[in-house]
Image (cartoon, coloured by chain):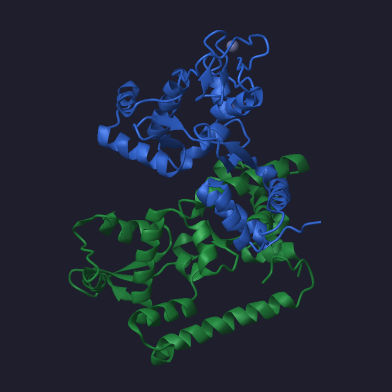
Amino acid sequence: MSLSQAFSQSLGVSQTQGRFGVEISDPVEKEKRVNELVQYMLIMDQKKIPIKKRDINRVILKGQNRAFNGVMEEAAEKLLEVYGFKIIELQDKLKDSYILVNNLELNESQKKLINTNQKDNAEMGLVFVILGMIFMNQNVIHEDEMWHALKKLGIFQDDLHSTFGNVKNLIMKEFVRKGYLRTELNTSTDPPTNDIYWGQRAEHEITKRNMLSMVCDINETQPSDWTYQMQLVMQEDQGSQQQEAENSAVPGPSSSSR
Amino acid sequence: MEVFGDGHRLFIQSMMSRGMMNISEVKEVISECGLDVETEFKDKVVKFVRLINQHIGPINLEIRKGLEEENGQPYYILANTAETSISRLSSTYSPNELELFKKLIESIVENEDGKIGSLAAMNLTDKLEKKIGKEEAENFFNRLEDDRWIRKNTNGKISLSVRSIVELDQYIKDVYPDYVKFCSLCTKLCLQGRGCENCGAKFHIRCSNVFFNKQGSNKTCPEPNCRAPWGQVVIH
Ligand SMILES: [Zn+2]
Ligand SMILES: [Zn+2]
């Protein structure tokens, strides 16, 4: 499998579909669109809101929708090779939208170099706390349970918070929109309440292993005390090992594959 | 030959997050990027940045070196080389906030000393078609300062930082050709500096300090066609 085929697969573009797509015939014109798409993805990603295929077609391809796969494939390659970002196509309700995930393996001091906005960092701290709660609660938490737990941190759903402002909107709308959380309306309760799960961005950005060791550090327990969570960590490790084995089976440009 | 690798990618990501870095920040980041900064630092930075610029050029980005007008400190800045550089900010600020930023740039460029008082800056909101409240405007100016587009000095006066000067260089030249002045010594845009009372030429503080130091005791205007005696230093 070549690198470009690997990209096609990760973008969910099958070879047959590709054949029906229409390439932009002028190479200079295509190069221009690819660069514009790279720039567009980098700018839009700063807000962490998934980038819609519809918007890419409108803003970058200006209606030449059938060139999408070809242009996207090359843009994905540049984003990885030059900027160290992987493009992820989201699934289910977020289908036809994309996020960038950092492909660099960074230690803590390196992470600080790229997260310099204090407000963003505070919000990420809150995201981590909630994701940790969900994970330790076997992958789902009811909204009222979450608010109850957040009270201990001085966060109240109906109050304006000094750092987060309208914290209810931030958690239930913004974090969901950014793909960190996913909510499902649970109608078995009266009145219906929201169940909160990890969102797709969280699944791609954060490993279960890191999450478990972080939670254990905070409440001074051992990862092995948490049987269910350890199982999920093992499953995740197996999954990534499998992927690595598939990747390393092909000779080719290795600077980007890990 | 230096090979483009994860260190360069990390530096680009860091630059995209910060917008600009001073020399000690560059040193810190580059050493986290896996380069030994203890020897031949200057030489290594030049090569490192040049290789990055070759890679980011296609999307109209370039890391440039610039000097802060007020204190002459050098900085590295991630600049957009396309003409529409102010539009790149549109992902960060709302259209109305951008209008206010443009008004701020306008009055700073039009002021001879390259600064504007905080009260005058607040009053710019009256010139907007779509009104912005005073508190909202103050928050916005604070954000511009946090994002290092503007600087506030101890008297609360606002000036454009080196990031704005480098990034918005072309925009300012294009939109305010009648107001902009260029330093006669380095030929670059000069908003804050010293002026000659005789010929009206303008110089960066740092550029003219270097010039006067070389001249010794008989100081004259650095402008070749003027050379009027430089009595007392006039700071506009
Ligand atoms: Zn100068
Ligand atoms: Zn003169």
On screen, A135 above or below B221? below
Work out whether residue B169 can be spotted. yes
Image quarter for ligand 2: top right
Residue A50, position as x, y percentages in the image = 48, 55
A90 or A160: nearer the viewer: A160
- The quarter of the picture where residue A9 lies is bottom right
Q: Which colour denotes chain B?
A: blue
A195 or A46: nearer the viewer: A46
A54 or A125: nearer the viewer: A125
- Residue at horizontal 30 percent and vertical 24 percent from the top: B123
- The quarter of the picture where residue A79 lies is bottom right
Decide if residue B30 is on the left or right side of residue A97: right
Residue A214, position as x, y percentages in the image = 42, 77
- The quarter of the picture where residue B150 lies is top left
- Residue at horizontal 48 percent and vertical 57 percent from the top: A115
On screen, B144 above or below B51? above
Residue B143, position as x, y percentages in the image = 38, 42
- Residue at horizontal 73 percent and vertical 61 percent from the top: A4
**Where is the N terminus of chain B found, in terms of image quarters?**
bottom right
B105 or A185: nearer the viewer: B105
On screen, B165 above or below B43? above
Q: How many marks?
A: 0
Work out whether residue A176 can be spotted. no
Decide if residue B111 is on the left or right side of residue A24: left
- Residue at horizontal 56 percent and vertical 62 percent from the top: A102
Q: Which colour denotes chain A?
A: green
Decide if residue A35 is on the left or right side of residue A132: right
On screen, A13 above or below B41? below
